[in-house]
Image: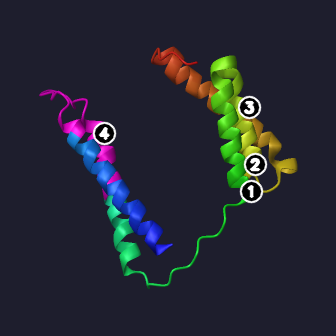
């Protein structure tokens, strides 16, 4: 696990550095925050947390435990996500997204038979909020 943490931290630090350098080439604004502000901020936070992960991994003892195999729920989430990606262009955002969120919520739920109502409600509300913000307010076309 320690080796995996070190490798992933180094990759994330390199990615953050690339984003910071690339965002620095964006046009600068003198009166407001320019287009490179948010990517630089996000990449800076990523670099800080990746550095934290790297230092923590380096300070761990050298015991090399094999990572546990992924749980079936993780594999099910990958499958649900794959189906969502395939179905999204065919049926659209408003149909596929709540179904995706419901399926994902039921997969990770501890007791899907009792917890299905909050999963369905939060999925429909989340889809409605996303549609309202992006499609109606920001005029971003959704599939």
Q: Which residue is mark 1?
A: 72
Of label 1 and label 4, which has the lower sequence position?
4
Q: Which residues are magenta?
A: 22-47
In which quarter of the view is residue 41 placed?
top left
Q: CA distance from mark 4 to mark 3?
A: 31 Å
Pinpoint residue 11: horizontal percent, then vertical percent.
36, 56
Q: Which residue is mark 2?
A: 107
Q: Is residue 117 visible?
A: yes
Of label 3 and label 2, which has the lower sequence position?
3
Q: Which residue is mark 4?
A: 39
Q: Is residue 127 magenta?
A: no
> Does residue 124 appear to the left or right of 47 in the view shown?
right
CB under 8 Å between discs 2 and 4: no
Q: CA distance from mark 1 to mark 4?
A: 35 Å
**Which label was assigned to residue 99?**
3
Q: Is residue 124 visible?
A: no
User: Considering the numbered disc 3 on the image, is that residue within a helix, a strand or a loop?
Assistant: helix
Pinpoint residue 122: horizontal percent, then vertical percent.
69, 37
Q: Which residue corresponds to the image point at 23% horizontal and 38% vertical from the top-left?
A: 22
Residue 142 to residue 49: above or below: above
């Amino acid at each position: 696990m320690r080796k995996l943490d070190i490798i992933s931290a180094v990759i994330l630090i390199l990615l953050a550095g690339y984003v910071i350098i690339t965002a620095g080439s964006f046009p600068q604004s003198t009166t407001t925050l320019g287009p490179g502000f948010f990517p630089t901020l996000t990449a800076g936070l990523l670099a800080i947390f990746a550095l934290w992960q790297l230092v923590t991994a380096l300070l761990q003892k050298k015991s090399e435990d094999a990572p546990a195999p992924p749980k079936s729920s993780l594999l099910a989430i990958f499958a649900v996500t794959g189906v969502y990606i395939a179905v999204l262009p065919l049926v659209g955002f408003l149909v596929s997204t709540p179904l995706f969120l419901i399926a994902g919520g039921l997969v990770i739920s501890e007791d899907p038979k009792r917890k299905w109502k909050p999963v369905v409600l939060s999925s429909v509300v989340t889809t409605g909020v996303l549609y309202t913000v992006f499609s109606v307010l920001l005029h971003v076309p959704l599939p």
